[in-house]
Amino acid sequence: MSRLATLLGLSQGSEDQQQLQTAFQESNRAKTPSRQTTNLKMSPIKYYYDLMSQPSRALFIIFRLSGMPFEDRVVALRNGEHLTDDFKRDINRFQRVPCINDNGNKLAESVAILRYLSAKGKIPEHLYPKYFVDQSRVDEFLEWHHMSLRLTCAMYFRTVWLEPLLTGRTPTEAKIEMMRMHMERNLDVVEEVWLESSDFLTGSTLRVADIFAACEIEQTRMADYDVRIKYPKIRAWLKRVRQSCNPHYDVAHEFVYKISGTGPQAKL
């Protein structure tokens, strides 16, 4: 500052130099962002779901295990509540569940929601790791699962249970057998690859991958398919997943147990 005053021809201690010093300080203050923050009260996320939906159940269980508060916004898919213009405009443009509204940030797709909440620190690392190597193992399964296990289990369920309920038409035995064959190809992979040498799908402990997969497989109960008969490793794994997630697992699957007529402890 004194060098600048010298260049401007101002003498040390002069009134002009003091005015220049004051102006310089005020200018710096104006450029410095205020450190004061506004304490905004954030509301819990609004969670739109129907426990008839497999990924809705998965996120429900994960949220409960995480201890994350959320507002229940149950959507009755059976009544078409997701198909209204209001739902499309205000809740989810894709008209599906699950989805969330996090203080104005609307987000759909279960895995996107999982990763978003993990990035915010809402999902514990033992369920969805932050260390990139461990996380990559979970992500590997989630990417495989979506277009293989989930797709074929869902199509079997739709063919055998949902479409006859909605249309009154019974599928042919040939179609049921084809859907069962596609599904069992992926169940074979779970049994022989993912559970080849570990208690859970991506390691020795429960992760979100196990929850997503279990919710998908449990859905087939409603189509009179009992995965436990043919797949002993899956049978033991499902028991471990349920034990690790309860009481939330049984709450999420109450409707599945009721419709299928097979309780969680049902014997073969």
Image (cartoon, rainbow, N blue to C red):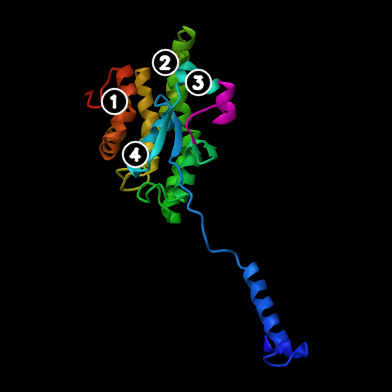
Q: Residue at x 34, y 22 (%)?
A: 255
How many neighbours does mark 3 have within 10 angstroms: few (below 14), some (14-19), or many (20 or more)?
A: some
- Point out residue 189 in the picture as x, y percentages from the top left corner: 40, 36
Residue 177 shown in magenta:
no
Q: Where does label 1 land, which residue? A: 229
- Point out residue 137 in the picture as x, y percentages from the top left corner: 43, 48
Mark 1 vs mark 2: which is more N-terminal? 2
How many neighbours does mark 1 have within 10 angstroms: few (below 14), some (14-19), or many (20 or more)?
A: few
Q: Where does label 3 land, which residue? A: 81
Q: CA distance from mark 3 to mark 1?
A: 37 Å
User: Where's the N terminus, which quadrant?
Assistant: bottom right
Which one is in front, 43 or 25?
25
> What number is the disc on residue 161?
2
Do the numbered discs 3 and 4 sit on residues whose CB atoms are within 8 Å? Answer: no
Do the numbered discs 3 and 2 sit on residues whose CB atoms are within 8 Å? Answer: no
Q: CA distance from mark 1 to mark 4?
A: 30 Å
Mark 1 vs mark 4: which is more N-terminal? 4
Q: CA distance from mark 3 to mark 4?
A: 24 Å
How many neighbours does mark 4 have within 10 angstroms: few (below 14), some (14-19), or many (20 or more)?
A: some
Which image quarter: residue 220?
Answer: top left
Residue 88 shown in magenta:
yes
Q: CA distance from mark 4 to mark 2?
A: 29 Å
Magenta region: which residues?
84-100
Q: Where does label 4 land, which residue? A: 64
Q: Say which amino acid is labelled 3.
A: Glu
- Point out residue 102 in the picture as x, y percentages from the top left corner: 49, 41
Position above or below: 189 against 206:
above
Mark 3 vs mark 1: which is more N-terminal? 3
Q: CA distance from mark 1 to mark 2?
A: 20 Å
Q: Residue at x 55, y 26 (%)?
A: 87
